[in-house]
Image (cartoon, helix red, strand yellow):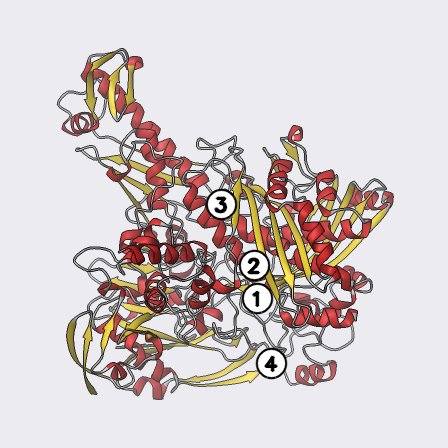
């Protein structure tokens, strides 16, 4: 293999152990004297806990302990890591004590000698609940809020199909009746009328925050000038992240050392250690070690601090024994944070020439029952800032209400805010094009930010650094043969064959993020990343990264990055991540940040190592430092090919220190903390060609073409793999997935029998192509690729289905576009 | 407790087990064969797929006692004499895995697909993989891997 593999599709170094069944996932681990935890969860969406009787469970053979919310009441609540002015943050108890606020809220925990016994004993716990009215529907939850009126006014001009989703969770009478039964009625500031159902009494109108971005006056002025206004109500469906590995945590308290080690399914072990130490457990940070070994997918769901991992830590310390908890799938679906779940009303103002003048958006964002770690950032800064899409929109105003409901908390899932923004913008673009009777491609082109406009300041805070949007679109059109396809579509319609062509020309902001910027916006976290490059005496290298790999292939790509910098073959690198005691502090993996931010930290540290190594080599070669270079893996003196030192020579001398230049310290290692100066902005053009079966409403994807610009590619095979997975995620959201609740707050999609993840036969092979516009502000030119597919795909798919249904007069359908929904839309048209 | 004798990856295993012990827990907890994973508990995801007398089963919904007297092959038993099975090699060559959690089950199912049909079309492979879920790859490279292995195995 050539020395420099950067930019090549090097086969993954992590695969040999994974394809032979030797992955090291958390649940695989066993410790001597280990116990198992089973968590009893609320079957009710909203209820007072009258009593919890654990006597029978405690007597069950094999049970070690049973704990309830009273036992853990001294622990801190689970933290929310991003604040807004006026934010209402209800306390999120580790184990619910007086009240449960969603199905899945932990009520008690059994610790037993084996997992079957723990589960048996949980059935013996008697919990008496007093069921309270629950609020599930997003629009019902905020009735009466001053800003909700905006939504209500928009409601009148809806497309008719929107009414499908309108239902009253509880009739007003039942509501009043139930409300009157609540003892100690808290004071509510509202005027007369039925007492509103509140998830938490402190959050009036179930609103945790109201947030806005953009210039309202300027936007209103733009609309006053408009020749045409396109209006759309969009519901972005709630989804399960659905990593195939359920979350798991194993805590082991060392009595002698008074320290605790936690192995867990984490995307960011340092964040887990910091928050659990500082806010929840009260264990000093240096006494808590968090290790994230192999992790079977995250997609956002393994970022946050959950009840379960706190419980095992606390219980292990109580018992002096290791405690393991592994989620069952049903538990996972009622305890892992959910994603998306918005209802938005959007208006797009255009002039007589089809140029966009302004965009106005009002969004209700479902936060669920509690505010989890990034819950308040996802529907605000990761959403509102992306509403300019790839377009030159002079005026934008967006207002968001963060809404509490009696459902599982909603937080980041692959894309986090950016899929919601992209879906809204791209559906609006298609709708406006249709209303204006122009081709959706031409309408997009007319409004693209052009290459000579960069850096481009959007109306919603971001400054796009680079891009060529026409280039990706051109390439996509060529790949699908657009003109021919439109002809085939027209022909097909004559014979009852309904083909649709859907575009999504998307941009995303990733590579999270400049720390001072996120700090100014309310983040309780920095967003730099760390690396430590340590050359050992024989010249092989350990690279320590604060990023975490749970499928992304860092063992391969990080070695490729460091190898290029140092001229040392990839097989001589060991990539170490996921252990807070081994690594410098790091912020972990989410927001497509590992390659762009974590990779840049590796480059920075490696360059420091290289500088020192060259100084030492020059000393050993008795040459000028300026004349020494690394070539073919050796330190050479320019123009004197006979004089050379190997990495072994230099590394060994750095450690022996027998002959160092004056003033040089021994050793050969450097760390770096890389803070990006801007987000990165991958973009692209996705095209979905689908066919709707007129008899059944079934949607079949015929072709999916994606042209992406994710900047420089470290490993094209891995880049494409990330895109495949993201696109499948997005297609899943568009066509199949819905984390559905019924009106009582029962989670209907609680197993993989009820939650429709895309299967192999539902999907086509994807046709991918790329343009490469390197990121101008980091040392590798990499932008990030983990989320792009999930951000772009839902709109491409939905646009293709709506396009296929154009002969039926269908203007919009909300995801997921199930056969029933599509079939009904066609029947209504008939 | 119930006494079972099961041949696992060519080795006879005798044990006294709880009659309700799931086969996947017997493999993982009793035998430390942790290559077989649990993803859904209800037979949808297929991460726990093993061969029971040469037929694929979801070991999360098979009782250990049901495997008494049978042969079980897990991912750990697939490579012979340190040489990767053609499917393992193809998954590596074609980036057929990312996080690796579904991979054991995917490969075990694929052995049966290719046994039943050594020359499958892409469509055949996709339909026969419907009992195995993957959230990372979008199946694109899994399908490619299975087709590549089929070609290798036909040639062998």
- Say which of marks 4 and 1 sits in front: 1
Q: Earlier in the sequence, mark 3 or mark 1?
A: 1
Question: What number is the disc on residue A132?
Answer: 4
Q: Residue at x 46, y 67 (%)?
A: B127
- Say which of marks 3 and 2 sits in front: 2
Q: Quadrant of residue A366?
A: bottom right
Where residue A597 sits in the image (x, y, percent)?
Answer: 44, 39
- Secondary structure of the residue carrying numbered label 3: loop
- Secondary structure of the residue carrying numbered label 4: loop
Viewer-closest of A340 and A194: A340
Give the chain letter at badge 2: A
Label 2, residues with CA under 10 Å away: few <14, some 14-19, many ≥20: many
| Mark 2 and mark 4 residues within 8 Å of each other at the beta carbon | no
For the residues labelled 3 and 2, the Cα–Cα distance comes to: 17 Å
User: For mark 2, what is the residue?
Assistant: A731
Q: Quadrant of residue A610?
A: top left
Q: Earlier in the sequence, mark 4 or mark 3?
A: 4
């Amino acid at each position: 293999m050539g020395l420099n593999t950067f930019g090549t599709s090097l086969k993954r170094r992590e695969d040999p152990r994974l394809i032979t069944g030797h992955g090291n996932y958390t649940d695989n681990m066993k410790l001597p004297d280990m116990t198992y935890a089973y968590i009893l969860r609320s079957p009710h969406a909203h209820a007072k806990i009258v009593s919890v009787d654990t006597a029978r469970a405690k007597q069950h053979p094999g049970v070690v302990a049973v704990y309830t919310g009273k036992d853990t009441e001294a622990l801190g609540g689970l933290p929310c890591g991003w604040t807004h002015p006026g934010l209402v943050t209800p306390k999120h108890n580790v184990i619910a004590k007086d009240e449960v606020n969603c199905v899945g809220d932990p009520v008690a925990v059994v610790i037993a000698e084996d997992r079957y016994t723990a589960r048996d004993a949980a059935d013996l716990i008697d919990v008496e609940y007093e069921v309270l009215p629950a609020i599930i529907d997003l629009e019902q939850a905020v009735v009466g809020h001053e800003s909700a009126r905006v939504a209500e006014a928009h409601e009148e001009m809806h497309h008719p199909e929107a009414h499908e989703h309108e239902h009253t969770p509880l009739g007003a009478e039942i509501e009043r009746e139930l409300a009157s039964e609540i003892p100690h009625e808290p004071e509510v500031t509202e005027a007369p009328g039925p007492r509103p159902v509140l998830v938490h009494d402190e959050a009036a109108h179930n609103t945790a925050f109201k947030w806005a971005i953009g210039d309202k006056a300027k936007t209103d002025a733009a609309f006053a000038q408009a020749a045409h206004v396109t209006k759309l109500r969009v519901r972005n469906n709630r989804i399960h992240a659905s990593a195939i590995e359920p979350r798991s945590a194993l805590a082991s308290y060392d009595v002698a050392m008074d320290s605790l080690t936690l192995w867990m399914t984490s995307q960011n072990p340092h964040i887990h250690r910091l928050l659990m130490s500082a806010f929840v457990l009260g264990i000093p940070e240096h006494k808590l070690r968090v290790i994230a070994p192999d992790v079977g997918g995250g997609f956002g769901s393994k970022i946050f601090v959950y009840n379960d991992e706190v419980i095992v830590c606390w219980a292990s310390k109580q018992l002096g024994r290791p405690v393991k908890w592994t989620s069952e799938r049903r538990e996972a679906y009622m305890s892992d944070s959910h994603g998306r779940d918005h209802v938005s009303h959007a208006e797009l103002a255009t002039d007589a020439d089809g140029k966009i003048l302004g965009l106005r958006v009002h969004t209700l964002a479902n936060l669920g029952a509690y505010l989890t770690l990034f819950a308040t950032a996802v529907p605000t800064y990761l959403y509102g800032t992306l509403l300019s899409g790839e377009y030159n929109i002079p005026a934008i105003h967006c207002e968001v209400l963060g809404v509490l409901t009696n459902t599982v908390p909603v937080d980041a899932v692959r894309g986090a805010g950016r899929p919601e923004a992209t879906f809204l913008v791209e559906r609006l673009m298609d709708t406006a094009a249709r209303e204006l009777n122009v081709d959706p491609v031409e309408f997009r082109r007319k409004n693209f930010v052009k290459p000579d406009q960069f850096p481009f300041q959007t109306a919603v805070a971001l400054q796009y650094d680079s891009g060529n949007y026409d280039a990706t679109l051109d390439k996509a059109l060529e790949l699908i043969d657009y003109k021919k396809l439109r002809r085939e579509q027209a022909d097909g319609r004559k014979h009852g064959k309904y083909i649709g062509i859907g575009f999504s020309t998307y941009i995303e902001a990733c590579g999270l993020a400049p720390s001072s910027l996120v700090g100014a916006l309310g983040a309780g976290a920095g967003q730099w990343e760390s690396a430590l490059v340590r050359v050992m005496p024989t010249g092989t290298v350990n690279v320590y990264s604060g990023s975490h790999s749970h499928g992304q292939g860092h063992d391969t790509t990080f070695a490729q990055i460091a190898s290029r910098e140092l001229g040392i073959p990839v097989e001589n690198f060991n990539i170490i991540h996921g252990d807070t005691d081994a690594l410098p502090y790091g912020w972990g993996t989410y927001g497509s940040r590992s390659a762009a931010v974590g990779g840049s930290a590796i480059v920075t540290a490696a360059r420091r190592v290289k500088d020192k190594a060259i100084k030492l080599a020059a000393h050993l070669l008795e040459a000028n430092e300026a004349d020494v270079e690394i070539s073919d893996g050796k330190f050479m003196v320019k123009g004197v090919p006979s004089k050379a030192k190997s990495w072994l020579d230099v590394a060994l001398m750095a450690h022996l220190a027998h002959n160092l230049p004056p003033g040089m310290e021994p050793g050969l290692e450097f760390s770096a903390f890389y803070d990006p100066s801007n987000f990165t902005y991958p973009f692209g053009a996705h095209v979905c060609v689908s066919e709707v079966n007129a008899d059944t409403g079934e949607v079949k994807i015929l072709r999916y073409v994606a042209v992406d610009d994710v900047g420089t590619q470290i490993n094209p095979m891995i880049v494409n793999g990330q895109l495949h997975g993201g696109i499948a995620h997005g297609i899943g959201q568009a066509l199949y997935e819905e984390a559905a609740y019924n009106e009582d707050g029962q989670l209907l999609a609680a197993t993989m029998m009820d939650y429709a993840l895309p299967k192999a036969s539902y999907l086509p092979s994807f046709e991918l192509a790329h343009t490469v516009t390197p990121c101008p502000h980091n040392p590798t030119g990499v932008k990030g690729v983990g989320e792009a597919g999930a951000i772009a795909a839902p709109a491409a798919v939905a646009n293709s289905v709506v396009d296929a249904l154009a002969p039926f007069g269908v203007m919009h359908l909300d995801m997921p576009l199930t056969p029933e929904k599509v079939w009904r839309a066609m029947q209504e048209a008939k | 407790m119930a006494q079972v004798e099961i041949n696992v990856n060519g080795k006879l295993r005798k044990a006294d087990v709880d009659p309700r012990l799931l086969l996947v827990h017997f493999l993982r907890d009793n035998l430390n064969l942790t290559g077989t994973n649990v993803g859904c508990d209800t037979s949808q995801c297929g991460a726990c797929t093993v061969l029971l007398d040469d037929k694929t089963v979801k070991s999360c919904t098979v009782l250990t006692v049901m495997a008494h007297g049978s042969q079980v092959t897990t991912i750990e038993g697939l490579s012979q004499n340190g040489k990767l099975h053609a499917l393992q090699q193809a998954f590596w060559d074609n980036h057929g895995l990312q996080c690796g959690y579904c991979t054991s089950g995917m490969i075990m199912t694929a052995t049966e697909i290719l046994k039943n049909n050594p020359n499958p079309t892409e469509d055949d492979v996709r339909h026969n993989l419907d009992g195995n879920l993957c959230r990372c790859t979008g199946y694109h490279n899994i399908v490619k891997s299975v087709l590549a292995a089929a070609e290798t195995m036909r040639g062998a």
